[in-house]
Every structure is written in C-alpha cells, then in structure tokens.
Amino acid sequence: MAVRSLLRKVSSVRPVCLDYADLVSNKNLYKEIEEAYSNSGLGVLTVKNIPNYSDRRKNLLPLARKLALLSDAEKAELELPQHKFSVGWSHGKEHYGGLADFSKGSFYANAEVDQAPAKGEWPDNVWPKKSLPELEGAFKDMGNTAIHVGTLLARHLDLFISSRVKNYIPNTLETIIATHKSHVGRLLHYFPQVGSNNNWCGWHNDHGALTALTSSLYLDQKTGQVVSANEIGDANVGLFVRNRKGEKIKVQANADHLCFQIGESAQILSGGILQATPHAVLTEGKLENISRNTFAIFMEPRGFYVMNSHDEKNVYIEHEGVPSLKNRWKQGMRFLDFHLNTIGAFN
C-alpha cells in the first residue's frame, strides 16, 4: 500500500528504556528515573522484556478496530450517557478546545474489578459479551500486565522521591497502584484521517499517577491487515511530547516496549520531583484508510483519596495549552474532585 509522504520532519527521541529484570531487582535506578521524569526529562520511559506482553498486545489492539466497526445498534448497547460515557463506548463525547472530538473512539473499563468497592466511586464495567466476546479477556490480560509492571516501577519511583525528600511518605505511589483497584483502561481506535487537522488527540497532561501506554498498531481500515512502519514512510504521525523548552518531539518506541508517562497526581504527591509532560497524538497530513490502535491504562488514586503534597509551591507547573493546575487542584482535595475539575476544564 502506498502512503503519500507527509509534511516536514520533526525531531524524534527514544526515551529512557528499562529492562523488566531491573524493575524486579533491587538495582538503583535513580539516574534513569531522573533522566526520564525530572525537570529536564520527557516525562516518559519505556520497559522492555516484559513476560507475555507482546502476545497480549497483539491479541488486544486489533479488537479496537473491530469494536469501532460494530453496528450503531451494537455500540449503543455499550454507551452509558448516565455515567458521562466514562465507561463503555465513547465517540464524539469528549471535547478539546471546546469542540467535540470525533477523531477517535474509546472503550473504557476497569481492568481489575467489574464493580467499584464503594458505591459512587466509579461505574460498573459493561462488556460486549455477544458482539465481541473476546474483548473482555484480552482487555483484562493487557491491563493487569500493565498494572503489574506499573507497580514495580512505582516502587522505584518511591525510593527515588524518598532519596530527595525527608518527609515523603514511603510507598505512596506503590500503594496506590498496587491496592486502589481504580485504574481505568482505555482501548483507543483513531479513525483514518480524511482532513488535515493533524490532531488525533490534542495537547494535555494525564492527571492520574502513572499511565501505561502500548506502542500503536496501524491497520488497513478495510481489511484489518497490519500496516508497517515502512508503508507509512516518513509520516510525522504518533505520540508527541513537548519538552521543558516547549519543543515538539516525537516519541519513538519499539512495538514490544511498554511506555510509562508520569501524571499530575504523581507530580502533586512527589512535590514536583516527578513532572508530567504535555503530549498529543498528531498526524501532519492525511493517512487515508489507515487507523491507529492502542491501549492505555490510567493508574489513579481511588476517588475518595485525599491529594496532599508535602511541597505545594513546586507542584504548580504551567504548560502552554494545558488548563492551569491551580484552577483544578488545591491542597486536601479528593482525587474524584480533581478528576471532575480536569474533565470540566476541557469542555
């Protein structure tokens, strides 16, 4: 398949890469964490050699396209407007810059538990048991793999923060990721680009603690066949971050690497030692008949968790195009309220 060459090249970077074996061990990873997540970092690193990861990615990501191509009636059964489309199927319900986002479809679910442990914390999962029965197992397998690796990474992040801060509460992030059971998985299908708005997902920060993100899978929308990087050519397409200098950088990651991005909750709880980075999914031109498919899991505190910071003055880091953190979080705020403030800031 010929894909026309797209616009100008931009700088691209391979993030810091950790080996799964290093996360399991007691190896000191302070240098790598500082390089990835400090003021001078990109806010993202990758992990390689994760057991079973590649197979689980291959099992799940093609299902994003199949889900998006279900009939309207089948997808309607997965839509829950009473929960503001925060679980199940969502398309055109989110807003960026005040405009409804029809560039992608999303399927949301908790990968660990189908029902919240406390009423009102989050809605129950809904699964396409008849129209796409294989989705539930593949979604949970991938989600739990990501949470497992995220827990290992969080242990090292806590140690790094503790080495810098005397009054940091030990195991803060590890406890959230290992025990809160509130982590939202999101299977994403980015529809083929028919215009040139070069915006599959606008600039934003994640507001959870840690986000795991698979490398994308590009598919021919008609046949479902995999589209290789060579077929896409030099297209400036994929995940971009904006570094501390405001420069736009494309993130390069191998298909068998799992990416981890710092969220604003970790920025708050670490007192700004770990810093979230604005990111977006862009296409500079058209990718006709090619869809992008990926999976993210947002590892978040429970809704009733109180968000305090030991160093509030260093938490408020402003980024162009990202709603001000000062207007969304205050000391002592519950995560649920921080979440709702953040969602509201984009609508």
Image (spheres, rainbow, N blue to C red):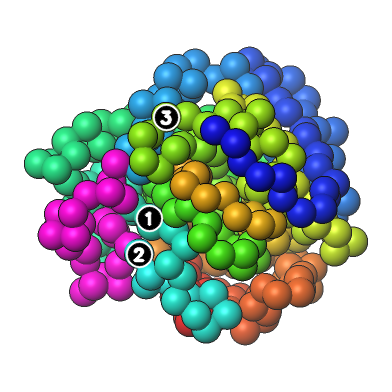
> Closer to the N terminus: mark 1 or mark 3?
1
Q: SS for tag 1?
A: strand
The magenta region covers: 66-90
Q: Are marks 2 and 1 in contact (CB under 8 Å)?
A: yes
Left or right of 194? Residue 5 is right
In the rendered image, residue 81 lying in the magenta stretch gets the answer: yes
| Neighbour tally class for label 3: few under 14, some 14-19, many 20 plus, Cα within 10 Å | few
State the residue position of label 3: 225
Instruction: Report the residue that reaches farthest toward the left.
Output: 130
Task: Give the residue type at disc 3.
Answer: Gln
Question: Which label number is shown at residue 106?
Answer: 1
Separation of disc 2 and disc 3 at Cα?
23 Å
Q: SS for tag 2?
A: strand
Left or right of 269? Residue 342 is left
- Whether residue 59 is situated above or below residue 85 in the rendered picture: above
- Whether residue 164 is situated above or below residue 203 in the rendered picture: above
Question: Which label number is shown at residue 41?
Answer: none
Separation of disc 2 and disc 1 at Cα?
7 Å
Left or right of 104? Residue 39 is right
Q: SS for tag 3?
A: loop
In the rendered image, residue 226 lying in the magenta stretch gets the answer: no
Question: Which label number is shown at residue 91?
Answer: 2
Residue 339 x, y percent position in the rendering? 47, 70
Task: Give the residue type at disc 2.
Answer: His
